Structure formats: structure tokens, C-alpha cells
Amino acid sequence: MPHTRNGIRRVGAILATAAALLMSGCAVTDVQGETSAGGYAPYLPEVRSDDAGLREDFEATPQESHDFWSDPEKLEDAEGMEFQSPDNSLPPGPGDPATGAYLPASATMPSDPTGYGTVATAEVFDRNGLGASTFGRLYFTFDGQMLNVCSATIVNSDSGSIVVTAAHCVVTTDGTGTVAQSVIFVPGDRNDAQEQPHGMWAATSVSVPQQFVDGAITDDQGYLQSDEGWNYDFAFLKMEEKDGQTIQEVAGAQGIAFGVPVDTLTQIGYPSAGEFDGREEYMCASTSFTSNWQGGYTHDCNMTQGASGGGWLSDYDQETGTGYVVGVTSTISTGIPDTNSPVLGQTALNLYNELDGA
């Protein structure tokens, strides 16, 4: 199930090997600023580096992006992106360094969240609480002709305008770092954006790890030439304001964590290939996930392309629909129903802080 862009087959490598990173221990669940049972209190340190990664304002104005996607047939024709390859003995790489930093969701989070346990075969997502409004679909193009779609999540921020997705959804993997065009996000999307309960929002800026731009390279056959960049397959988008309101004020925001202990994972996304058609939102969950060659998380889940960029949340609560985004859907394994996520850590924190403050 390779992804094709401009006639070139682009494939990311998968290898489920151990790359241990803070994946067990007490979870962080604190919304009032008090120290949690895991010994953490919410905080977001200052940016460490002036060169956190590729930062670019989109050339298209928000109105031009809205105009580009005003044809419902374009929204229906948008295709998901998928990166996979057979085992090619890639060595495990270090993940994004953990920081312990996190910020709660915009709604009250329970101290004892009720999760889903283990769900390896994707189920239709229940959309309770913030779950109804903070997850959505990202529509974009790279050449104005091929129409693409990924998944994304609104995360809590000072600006109220930050959405997280996968880096491969917003920059090419040919070494040029070409940035996507006409990027829009539909929170709570249903039926190829025929239903937009919280509106359609245009992205104005993007921030991507330089490690991904430089290291997530594929050759003209679509096979990986460099592997370590995939450890940083995440990106942040800053969204427009509409009628004086931010996307967070309208739809709310999930919590976000940059390398903290995790004991449960819930994956949300819009798979659009195989048995899925992208018209509905699905979830997988696990309590026994493992580490992967990206220095991140792997668990059993049969989601397909279109789910790329969807949030992986720790401490997700079914009733309030709140949790902490700790990663995003990046790649799938070949021959087995596994999906993989990098860890949001120090680099992600730098990008997030930089874009949020801009």
C-alpha cells in the first residue's frame, strides 16, 4: 500500500526493535498545577535552541486556502499517505529526548481516567467530550494537483492556535523539504468534510524538525536512504483566527506532553484505505505497547493511510474525551497490523514553543 506523489513511490522503513524510552511508570494527570502522582507539575520550559527546525509561513492566505478547497469533490478525492517497507535491518535510533514537560487539556481532566484497555482492531471513535471537537482531518496538496489528507489534533497552547500532525504530511521526503500548500484543518470532520461542526480552519505557519527534513529521505524507488529522520516525524501548525476567535476557543484542545512516563495509549485517526473510506473517525488503544526503531511507540492496530498524523494520547478518558498527546501516527509495519509513533520530546517542545510564541 505505498503512497505515490508525482509518480514517485515513497516508502518509510519499519523495524520493530527495542529502543527503550520512558514508556512505563506513573501517568501524569493534573490540571490544577499541583504535582501529580508521577512527580510532575505542568510546565513548559523556554526554547533551548534558536535553530529548532524548519519554520515557514505558508504563501497562500487563509482565504486562498479556503478557496482552493471550496469544491466538495476535492475534499472527497483527497487521498491518505502511507509509509512502509519490509524489514531492511535498520538499527534502532534514539528518540526525541524526554523533558518531563506537559500541559493539560483545555477542559478538566479526571485524576483517574477510564481508558479503552486494548483495542487492536480499529473501532469507530465515540467522540465524547473534547473527543468530539479536537481531532480532525488535515487537507493539503504539494503540487496543486494531487490532493492529500492526514489526521491532526488541536493541542493546548498560549496562542490557542496550535495543531499537531506528522511531518510527512506537511513536507516532502525527497531531501528538498518542500512544504505543503493550501493546508486546512476540519475538527470533528465527517463524510469528507461534508459535515464541519466546528468549521474549517486554514494553517498560516508550519514548524518541522530539521532532522526530519535532512534525514527522512527516500530514493527514486521509494526506499529509505536515511533512517534517523523518521524519529522526528512530527510537525506543528499555527492556524488562522476567525471572527476574532482562535481554534482552541471554538473547539477546545487536548493536553500535550514532551517525554513523560506513559502507561496507556489511545490512537485516533481517519483511515482511508482498505476497509476504511476516511468518512469516519476510528480509535485503537493499548496497555502493552512496545518501543520501535524510531525511539517511539508501536502497538497492534489495523488503521491504514489517512490516519497519518493522528494523535497518540496517554491517560485518555472516555467520558471527558481528554488526554495528553505524546506522539502521532507515523508509519505502519509490513505484513502485520502494527502502527508506529515517534515520541514528542525536546525537539518537539522547541518547535511548539517557537511557533506558539510567534
Image (spheres, helix red, strand yellow):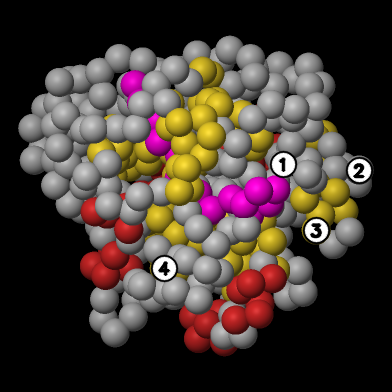
Q: Residue at left 80%, top 27%?
A: 86
Label 1 Cα neighbours within 10 Å, binned few <14 / some 14-19 / many ≥20:
many
Instruction: Please give left or right for residue 129 compared with residue 338 in the image.
Output: left
Spatial separation of the CA atoms under disc 1 and disc 4 = 26 Å
Residue 85: quadrant of the picture: top right
Q: Earlier in the sequence, mark 1 or mark 3?
A: 3
Q: Which amino acid lies under the numbered mark 1 shown in the image of this protein?
A: Phe
Residue position marked by numbered label 1 in the rendering = 83
Q: Secondary structure at mark 3?
A: strand
Residue position marked by numbered label 3 in the rendering = 5
Spatial separation of the CA atoms under disc 2 and disc 1 = 13 Å
Q: Secondary structure at mark 4?
A: strand
Spatial separation of the CA atoms under disc 2 and disc 3 = 12 Å
Q: Which amino acid lies under the numbered mark 4 shown in the image of this protein?
A: Met
Q: Which amino acid lies under the numbered mark 3 shown in the image of this protein?
A: Arg
Q: Residue at left 80%, top 58%?
A: 5
Q: From where the camera sits, is residue 219 visible?
A: yes
Tag in front: 1 or 4: 1
As drawn, 76 above or below 103: below
Q: Earlier in the sequence, mark 2 or mark 4?
A: 2
Question: Answer yes or no: do the residues labelled 1 and 4 have beta carbons within 8 Å?
Answer: no
Q: State which region is magenta.
A: 263-276
The answer to which of 246 and 206 lies nearer the viewer is 246
Q: Which amino acid lies under the numbered mark 2 shown in the image of this protein?
A: Gln
Q: Earlier in the sequence, mark 2 or mark 3?
A: 3
Tag in front: 4 or 3: 3
Q: Earlier in the sequence, mark 4 or mark 3?
A: 3
Residue position marked by numbered label 2 in the rendering = 221
Q: Secondary structure at mark 1?
A: loop
